[in-house]
Image (tube, helix red, strand yellow):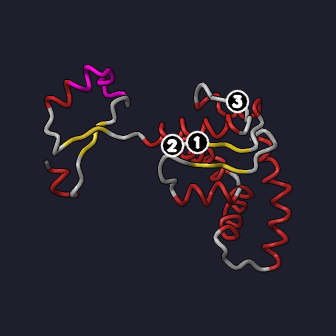
Amino acid sequence: EKVQSAYQMRTVFHHHCAGFIETPDEIAKLMHLTDPSLMGLCFDTGHSYEHTVQFVQIALFAEIFYCASLERLMETIKISQPHIMTAVPRFYNNLYNKMQPKLKESYIFSKTVDLGSKIFLGQRVNILERLFNKILNYVVRKKVVKSFGGNLKAFISGGGPLDKNIGVFLNSV
């Protein structure tokens, strides 16, 4: 009731996020014990997106690869050599977080992101920045693309909103 009155929002329960309520019987019991005006079930758009996009990929005769864990992500990407990666925003959040230490420790990577962000956002760049950006395409961005299998042309996010800063970051590198 506090959440609903403070934020004019109803609480929803996501039934398979380590909440120990996952089976249909457990969910039915929870809903029976809960006031429906205060709590509902989460419609998981991430899974809806994931399952829908599979049909598009199949229709295009695309190869579909799944990664067993985040720890094996880059290994899987190097093997699959994707042209397009589709995922839910949480995946890109994790990818972004994984790249942050590199951003903090590498001046050149940091400058690549700064300049790439400026260009992506349509901000004005001078002639030296344009020249430097061309150099960064070969020195940094080429390595980034290679670390993603060498063929990557686009990231596609669906199932929920992608944080704008993460979208800008990914487009900058």
- Please tell me which of labels 3 and 2 falls first in the chain: 3
Q: Residue at x 72, y 34 (%)?
A: 77
Asked whether, in this view, residue 30 is left or right of residue 114, the answer is left
From which residue to which does the magenta span run?
Answer: 18-28
Q: Are marks 3 and 1 in contact (CB under 8 Å)?
A: no
Residue 125, relative to residue 150: is it above or below? below
171 and 113: which is toward the camera: 171
Three-letter amino acid code at disc 3?
Thr
Q: Residues within 10 Å of mark 3 (few under 14, many from 20)?
A: some
Secondary structure at badge 1 equals: strand
Residue 19 sits inside the magenta stretch = yes
Residue 69 sits inside the magenta stretch = no
Where does residue 35 sit, x and y in percent of width and height?
A: 13, 39
Q: Residue at x 47, y 49 (%)?
A: 160
According to the image, label 1 marks what residue?
87
119 and 16: which is toward the camera: 16
Q: Nearer the viewer, mark 3 or mark 1?
A: 1
Asked whether, in this view, residue 75 is left or right of residue 33, the answer is right
Three-letter amino acid code at disc 2?
Arg
Q: Nearer the viewer, mark 2 or mark 1?
A: 1
According to the image, label 2 marks what residue?
90
Where does residue 33 sit, x and y in percent of width and height?
A: 13, 29
149 and 33: which is toward the camera: 33
Asked whether, in this view, residue 22 is left or right of residue 69, the answer is left
Three-letter amino acid code at disc 1?
Ala
Q: Residues within 10 Å of mark 2 (few under 14, many from 20)?
A: some
According to the image, label 3 marks what residue?
76
Where does residue 101 sit, x and y in percent of width and height?
A: 61, 46
Q: Quadrant of residue 63?
A: top right
